[in-house]
Image (cartoon, rainbow, N blue to C red):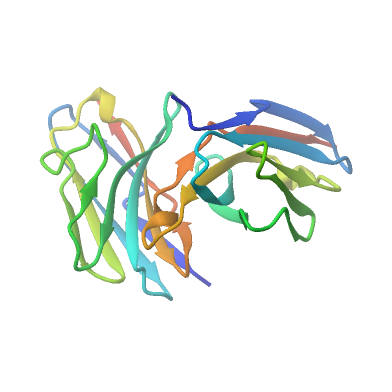
Amino acid sequence: GALVYQYPRRTICKSGTSMRMECQAVGFQATSVAWYRQSPQKTFELIALSTVNSAIKYEQNFTQEKFPISHPNLSFSSMTVLNAYLEDRGLYLCGARALNTLYFGEGSRLIVV
Amino acid sequence: QQQVRQSPQSLTVWEGETAILNCSYENSAFDYFPWYQQFPGEGPALLIAIRSVSDKKEDGRFTIFFNKREKKLSLHITDSQPGDSATYFCAASEGGEGGSAKLIFGEGTKLTVSS
């Protein structure tokens, strides 16, 4: 079956520091990867949509300068949250698309102190 | 503006009953509607999905009923089990190459099945 592995599952970082998270598609090749943030206040927010060999498209309120994404091949993507502050807290979800279906990983939870 | 709305916010049913979770949307261009099930501390897992060309999709105890004219759909969970207790998210997307990766989510319905 399609599995999406995210690492780390949870990070506690000091305000102003950065956090890098990874996403690995296991058992399939993801034609595109969508990064979401889930928070109690705003449910799911799409951060960016990344397709291999195409430019990464960021949604309004999210920028490459703040959330740089790397997507070097069909099974791996990473995203960094730079200069994290309290408003960046949440569960960051990687959704890997295969056969017109989006499969999510368990998420990387960012806690900022 | 919330493009995908879910109701109720929370729902409690007894074991064996049918739980009905509702979803409505604004954008007529949406043509793919997946439902995700999420347990606390875990990522959302795809449960069942429907495309706008169909009015019903069934998978075991889970059935989606879709009304394109009214822009409404519902998820029916028959013979509800305590293990079905989770938050259910309705999502929608437009067609096209990257369409199904760009999902718009509702705010979720928290289902509790009591035994």
Horizontal arrangement in the rendering, residue B93 relative to residue A113 (left or right)? right
Q: Nearer the viewer, residue A33 or A24?
A: A33
Give the mark count: 0
Residue A9 visible, this angle: yes
Horizontal arrangement in the rendering, residue B20 relative to residue B86 (left or right)? right
Residue B44 visible, this angle: no
Residue placed farthest to the right in the image? Answer: B16
The C terminus of chain A: image quadrant: top left
Q: Nearer the viewer, residue A95 or A17?
A: A95
In the image, residue B75 lies at what x, y percent? 71, 44
Please tell me in which quadrant of the rendered image residue B21 appears: top right
In the image, residue A17 lies at what x, y percent? 13, 34
Please tell me in which quadrant of the rendered image residue A87 appears: top left
Q: Residue at x 57, y 50 (%)?
A: B33
Horizontal arrangement in the rendering, residue B63 relative to residue B79 (left or right)? left
In the image, residue A5 lies at what x, y percent? 39, 61
Q: Residue at x 72, y 45 (%)?
A: B84
Q: Nearer the viewer, residue B60 or B113?
A: B60
In the image, residue A29 lies at what x, y percent? 37, 74
Q: Residue at x 58, y 43 (%)?
A: B39
Q: Residue at x 64, y 25 (%)?
A: B9
User: Up-down: is B10 above or below A29?
Assistant: above
